[in-house]
Amino acid sequence: MNIVKVHIMPLLLVVLLFLSCTTEIDHRGRTPLVGVGNDFLYKEDVAALYVTALPSVDSTEFVHNYIRGWLEDVLFYRMAVRNVASSGEVDRMVENYRRALLLNIYQERLIEQQLKQTLVDEDVEAFYNSNTDLFKLEEAQLQGVFLKLPLTAPRLQSVRKWLAKMTPEDIENLEKYNITNAVTYEYFVDSWRPLPAIAAKMPLTSEALLESLKKDAFVEVADTAHIYMLSSVAKLDKGEQTPLELASDEIKSLLINSMKANFVKKVKSDLYKKALEQGEIIFYDTESSAGADNNINRQ
């Protein structure tokens, strides 16, 4: 599509002609399609939006409809500006929102930079051991090795033998074999993977894979193009105790949330005391001043 060649409605051409005859405006290299007051819609913006539209959308119709919608929104906003009784009220609302947004961003940064650093592995482990009932698996988990191979892959018997034994030498052989033969090779002997995520890589349902693993730790299936091999070294069923390594992130979030309120309260209190001590706060009545002095002395 070439936006330059799109025929814009006569009304829009009149607006552009009017603009060109009045004030010289710097559009910074962009091509205006239409303008209302100091608001402009540029050809480049519409072209970028059209790229994301459905292929079946007519370019001329898309541009005309978008321009019409843009104009209506701008004109409606200008009407709102003229008719809202108190612009000061809007300014206060915007400033209050800005203050709340800044406070929230700063609070999250403080928590990220300082609070998270205070958590140590011992805290996480202690919470885990004291609240084991909170951590139950919502889906089965596996540890092991997964391979996806072409049907024509060589030395399949050797691969089966390596996966069955899983000695350090067998793992080394699998690593070397993977480089030139495997479509997919995943080694997760030291970490947990959700069983449904592994099943999704195979022509098996999660239920079928789970049933197969109950009979044998080695599962092999094939389709018309590939062979899929899974050697499971460990399995946890749904409802079992969640391993600490899987629960760690959740525990950290729980601990941080429980510490957050006191942390922010302390930061605010420290800022208040420092400002009082350095004379940054001015009280214009003696009662407030005395109350502040007494309060800081108690803290």
Image: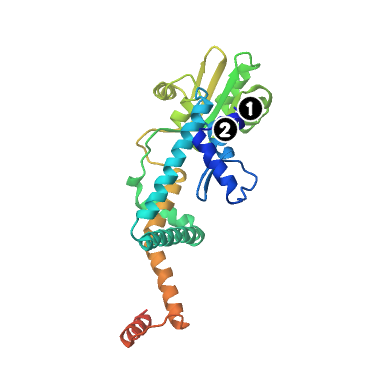
- Front residue (pair 232, 72): 72
Coordinates of residue 171 in the picture (x, y in percent): 62, 30
- 152 over 44 or under it: above or below: above
- 275 over 210 or under it: above or below: below
- Front residue (pair 195, 143): 195
Q: Label for residue 250?
A: none
Residue drawn at x 43%, y 74% as measured from the top left: 270
The residue tagged 1 is 174
Coordinates of residue 252 in the picture (x, y in percent): 43, 52
Q: Residues within 10 Å of mark 1 (few under 14, many from 20)?
A: many
- Front residue (pair 51, 253): 51
Residue drawn at x 51%, y 33% as measured from the top left: 10
- 252 over 45 or under it: above or below: below
Residue 84, by quadrant, is bottom left
* Count of numbered labels shown in the rendering: 2
Say what secondary structure mark 1 lies in. Answer: helix
Say what secondary structure mark 2 lies in. Answer: strand
The quadrant of the rendering that contains the C terminus is bottom left
Of the residues shown, which amino acid type is indicated by label 2?
Tyr
For marks 1 and 2 on the same chain, the one whose residue lies earlier in the sequence: 1
Q: Is residue 196 left or right of residue 185?
A: left
Contact (Cβ within 8 Å) of mark 1 with mark 2? yes
Residue sitting at the far left: 287
Residue drawn at x 52%, y 41% as measured from the top left: 15
Of the residues shown, which amino acid type is indicated by label 1?
Leu
Q: Label for residue 187?
A: 2
Coordinates of residue 297 in the picture (x, y in percent): 37, 83
Q: Is residue 119 visible?
A: no
Q: Is residue 183 visible?
A: yes
Coordinates of residue 11 in the picture (x, y in percent): 49, 36
